Amino acid sequence: MSAGRPALAVEVVTLFPDEVRAALGMGVVGRALERGLVTVGVDNPRRLATDVHGTVDDRPYGGGPGMVLKVEPLATVVEEAARRLPAGSPRIYLSAQGRRFDQAAARRLAAGPGFLLLAGRYEGVDERLLDEVIDEELSIGDYVLTGGELAALVVIDSVVRLVPGVLGAAESAEQESFGTATGLLDWPHYTRPDEWRGRPVPGVLQGGNHAAIRRWRLKQALGRTAERRPDLLAGRELSNEELKLLDEYREERES
């Protein structure tokens, strides 16, 4: 753990705790947990159910398909989990109606003391729960998932890797896609062999000229972003160097 910084504390409220626990034990997140850089608690509202089936949902008022998660058990478990977190830890519902989760949100959560994630299921949760005990809603994308567990794991993975000391190389988190303040996509990466199926590694990467390599990487990042995610450039003022590199990239692609 970084000197002077307590472990990032996370709580997940889910109807499928085993799914979450199994994924948390692997890779970067698993190693961060082992090293005490992060703690993750998992709680299940079904433990408060009053019938043998563990029912925590009911039919929606007004009719319609599906079931809605009930407010009472969820509110109790969310509030109990929140009390296990440091003060200032936001309570987040993972929802298609939420604000888009992005790298800026990941950095914000990584810089804080902790956070709680509520994973929804079925048709969603009683709106009163959101009004009373949830601070914000986040969405990981414009598509439908069976439940919020996968979304919770995406958020945890994205945030944990930004916690100081989690990644092996100090600059790794900053050099990958969206890792820097530029908000550009990543540049192409290559390793041995020097040539594969007639495709050589770009010569600039083999020359050892670090200034030329930096320039090439920035050019590729700008070009990829313009082609694949032009929305990321729409609100960003490019420097003179970046404008020149982007023009070079486009000319090279056209030729």
Image (cartoon, rainbow, N blue to C red):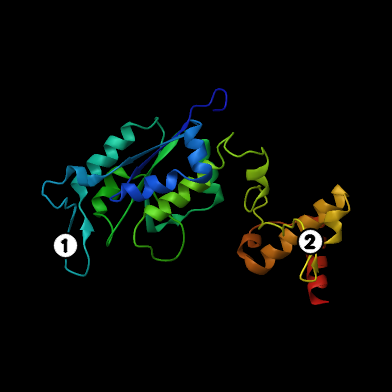
What is the C-alpha distance between the residues marked 2 and 1? 56 Å
Q: Tell which residue pokes out farthest to the bottom in this image.
A: 255
Name the amino acid, label 2: Leu
Q: Can residue 69 be seen in the rendering of this structure?
A: yes
Local crowd size for mark 1, using a 10 Å CA cut-off: few (<14), some (14–19), many (≥20): some
Between 121 and 54, the residue placed more toward the observer is: 54
Q: Do the residues labelled 2 and 1 touch (CB within 8 Å)?
A: no
Is 9 displayed left or right of 77 in the figure? right
Q: Tell which residue pokes out farthest to the left in this image.
A: 51
For residue 232, which quarter of the picture? bottom right
Tag nearer the camera, 2 or 1: 1
Between 14 and 102, the residue placed more toward the observer is: 14
The spot of residue 40 in percent (x, y) is 40, 38
Local crowd size for mark 2, using a 10 Å CA cut-off: few (<14), some (14–19), many (≥20): some
Count of numbered marks: 2
Q: Can residue 138 be seen in the rendering of this structure?
A: no
Residue at 25%, 40% in the rendered image: 77
Residue at 54%, 28% in the rendered image: 1
The spot of residue 205 in percent (x, y) is 83, 55
Name the amino acid, label 1: Arg
For residue 96, which quarter of the picture? bottom left
The spot of residue 201 in percent (x, y) is 80, 62
Q: Give the residue at mark 1.
A: 59
- Residue 243's disc is 2
Mark 2: secondary structure: helix
- Residue 127's disc is none
The tag earlier along the polypeptide, 2 or 1, is 1
